Amino acid sequence: MRRKLPAVLLSAALAFVVTACGSGSGGTTTADDGKITLGFSQVGSESGWREANTKSIKESASTAGIDLKFSDAQQKQENQIATIRSYIQQKVDVIAFSPVVVTGWDAVLKEAQAAKIPVVLTDRAVDSDASLYVSFLGSDFVKEGEAVGDWVLNEYKDATGPVNIVQLEGSVGSAPAIDRKKGFEAKIASNPNLKVIASQSGDFTRADGKEVMTAILKANPKIDLLFAHNDDMGLGAIQAIEEAGKKPGVDIKIVTIDAVKDGMQALADGKINFIAECSPLLGDQLMEIVKQIKAGQPVEKRIITKETTFTQEQAAEALPSRKY
Ligand code: GZL
């Protein structure tokens, strides 16, 4: 005859089963309502690109029914590391972040792995071992630098003398700054007339772009071209160039990367000459990856976003339908 379990034991056993079933991969516990919890650490709010990226992440999480914990690190790696540690303590189901710089992530990624919480990199890469994260979702920054370099090679293919180039680099130590510089400089090396006479970080912000370009204009009377690693630094430099009494896009040609609305407007207005796109709309793809991870499905290690380039004519046509 089956002995009846006392009610208190039965309810305790039931509670354990429910809790166990509700647990995510490894030691995480999916929220009581079964919702996936994603902890996201964002670089900051330094540029129009970043604001569009944040909007994409938040809107896509809401649409996907994923419970998003979001933090803005104000471009400080120590803030990102502290936030990732707090997500580990909270036992979120998945951690995703856009690493402000390439180095210094091994320890915290190992802590997440020990806690059996999968990590997804978005937008920027790290130099940690690839076994420490599930996937990278973002752009190929070397290709973006090469696309700008190709335009410059063509623009000055008939130059008979030196073409003086200024480069405004992104945040020091960040993957986009390192790789855009690498792609651009390797591409223009084939024409010895193309000379980078000054190259300095403007930290991807409009204010720093203006400040650095103002100093470079004072020190260099003949500048033919500016390559800014993002639209925002290019827009800051435009202010500096105009305050120096020169015509941006004419006296000093300007090429940038991102293709956010303000950059595309300057391109259509003739103040910028060429932009290579870098899409910030990573939210939907990130939420798909998060759901695949929780469903135990395989995820590609490196997912590169599709991007294009814009001339002044193409910008005028594209502007009305741009999402960011
Ligand atoms: C690129 C992204 C860069 C943008 C900048 O994916 O990391 O950071 O190009 C942004 O506008 O600040």
Image: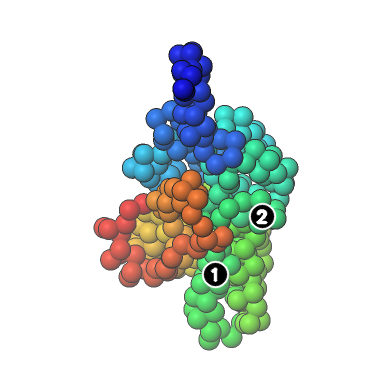
Instruction: Report which quarter residue 226 is drawn in.
Output: bottom right
| Residue beneath the point at 39% across and 30% down | 33
Q: Which residue is mark 2?
A: 131
Residue 106 in sight:
yes
Number of numbered discs present? 2
Percent position (x, y) of residue 302? 55, 61
Is 12 in front, or is 125? Answer: 12
The CA distance from mark 2 to mark 1 is 25 Å
| Residue beneath the point at 66% across and 51% down | 132
Closer to the camera: disc 2 or disc 1?
A: 2
Percent position (x, y) of residue 15? 48, 23
Is 83 in front, or is 213? Answer: 83
Q: Which residue is mark 1?
A: 143
Residue 211 in sight:
no
* Amino acid type at mark 1: Lys
Percent position (x, y) of residue 53? 44, 48
Q: Secondary structure at mark 2?
A: helix
Percent position (x, y) of residue 30? 48, 34
